[in-house]
Image: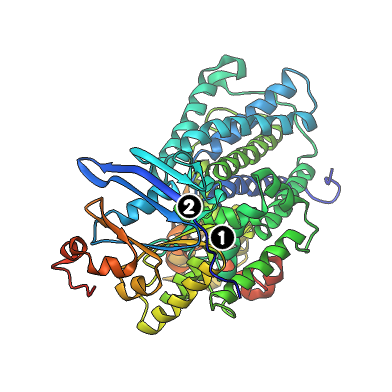
Amino acid sequence: MLGGWIDNYTQSVLIFTGINIIAAYSFFAPFKTGQVSLGQAGFMAVGAYASAVLTQKFGLPFIVSLPVAGLFAGMIGVMVGFPALRIRGVYLLLLTLGFAEIVQVIVLSWDYVGGAQGYRNIPFNPNTLGYVAVVIIALIVFFGRLERASLGRAMDSIHQDETAAEAMGIDVVRIKLFAFGAGAVIAGIAGGLYAHQATYIDSTTFNVMLAIEILTYVVVGGGSTYWGPLAGATALTLLPEFLRALREWLELVPVAWTDFFPMNRIYDFLYGFLDFENAKRLIVYGLILILMMIVRPDGLLTRDSLMRLHFSRWTARHA
Amino acid sequence: MLDRPVTNKTCLAVERLTKRFGALYALNDVSFEVAAGHIHALIGPNGAGKTTFFNLVTGALPADDGRIVFEGEEISDGRPFRRTLKGIARTFQNIRLFPHLSALETVMIGEHCRSYGSIWQALTSAVLQKPFNEAREERRMRENALELLEFFGLAGKHHTKASDLPYGDQRRLEMARALATQPRLLLLDEPSAGMNPHETVELDKLIIRLRDRGITIILVEHDMRLVMDISDRVTVLNFGTKIAEGAPDDIQKNPTVIEAYLGEDVPL
């Protein structure tokens, strides 16, 4: 669609950044009520496989299969959400992780969706960038309005003290279930978008590492405001691209500047380190996380910091 | 000026209420009635079962035995938020505010259950609001909340985060939040704990003003001066059993009560 004025490489970077942003919002929805889920990659898998089956085996158009896949993931989400209501913290993390593992095992052993060979020949969607843009805008509008509305405040209160929220007449069970289901719908849509962009998925596409990356986006971006997931996912997805560009700039440094000790060693180290085709990405992730936890434990963007930037008229705080 | 509501109606009645924790009876066969429009104090030494009583009435804990009747309707079953909807609100002994919400937002949380009957109503209202424009309901909630904050002497602090407020303000904010749920029965769990003598005197007036609004109040309190000054009726618990009930003057002379408190340095 935009091929005329964006080259393929940029387009694909934008698409995967966008899918990561959507995935980050899928984590944000349950997180707003205090539920930390490592199952979002599992819901992405559900959405991806559902959408792929609907288009490839049933011949439905993508514009139909995508929302259906999202709703299907949402139904599974509500089913997982029920037992998740009773448990908190580390135990909820383990439950959602267990769910994601079950999904992985099912797609691995189910020949109908390709089994161990993976799901091939998923119809390619040439307009993914447009879809991604529309979904992200819809999510920002939705979560923005939620943050200014009573329901959003109620979700925050559940996050901060569930017992007190319930005692104040908040229907904690329903709101938590809604948040978990909404997160699953969003994850399913992210998965569907991914499947029709990559055209190939298998049981390892949506693994635990992905779930942890999604969590990282929100933790780094900031979980207290709806701009956090956007900031975190964008920053962390584009970081490797930025470092790749840095490597190219490094090549422009005149040899004479670095042709002596210790500059040659430093140069070699940096040049090697910035090679982001390998697992060093994870080292950088780890370092960023540790640094963030020390410097800004609440994430890059917090409600308080946005408030100070005169965003106050967008929130319920002013009177 | 609203006159004292003179009525013989019962607001809350508990019958043979029992709660066990293992072999320990936190409440054993406790029955009493709270008259509508009264300030009814619930006193007793530590571990007498006062907070357990609150937890049973608000539904935070299920009762093992007995009935709880609120305004003639049995409410022994049901989750806490349903009881709040019926008109019972509480404060907590250890303050439980939402640390990151401002005072104003905190009170608006209390109003949520009255403004939106269901999550779908709340959701449509959130999604359908005009961009950058507050919904009418939101504005109404905010004006209400500001009024409540003023009533509790918290005017001008509505932007302050709950956790940044001084202790006495936090106690009053908890009361404002409870009042925002429009209760007819308010359970106050040691409202004077941590307050200085001046604040406690202010609290006297505040609780009486609440009663004059027509709200029935059950008060758990260790400050005997406060209890004896403002209560219409006093029930005394000890080791989960009711040992006395009556007007404040009678309770102070009751030998059983004095015995229960003996050894504790509480002037009766």
The residue sitting at 65% across, 56% down in the picture is A150
Task: Say if residue B135 shows up in the picture.
Answer: no
Scheme of image coloration: rainbow
Q: In this view, which residue lies farthest toward the right?
A: A4
- State which quarter of the image contains the C terminus of chain B: bottom left
The residue sitting at 51% across, 22% down in the picture is A106
Pointer 2: what residue?
Answer: B10
From the viewer's side, name the closer residue of B8 and A232.
Answer: B8
Residue B115 horizontal side relative to residue B245, left or right:
right
Which amino acid, mark 2? Thr
Which amino acid, mark 1? Ser
The residue carrying pointer 2 sits among few (fewer than 14), some (14 to 19) or many (20 or more) residues within 10 Å by Cα, namely some
Residue B103's quadrant in the figure?
bottom right
From the viewer's side, name the closer residue of A170 and A209.
Answer: A170
Above or below: residue B207 compared with residue A17: below
Numbered circle sitting on residue A224:
1
Numbered circle sitting on residue A96:
none
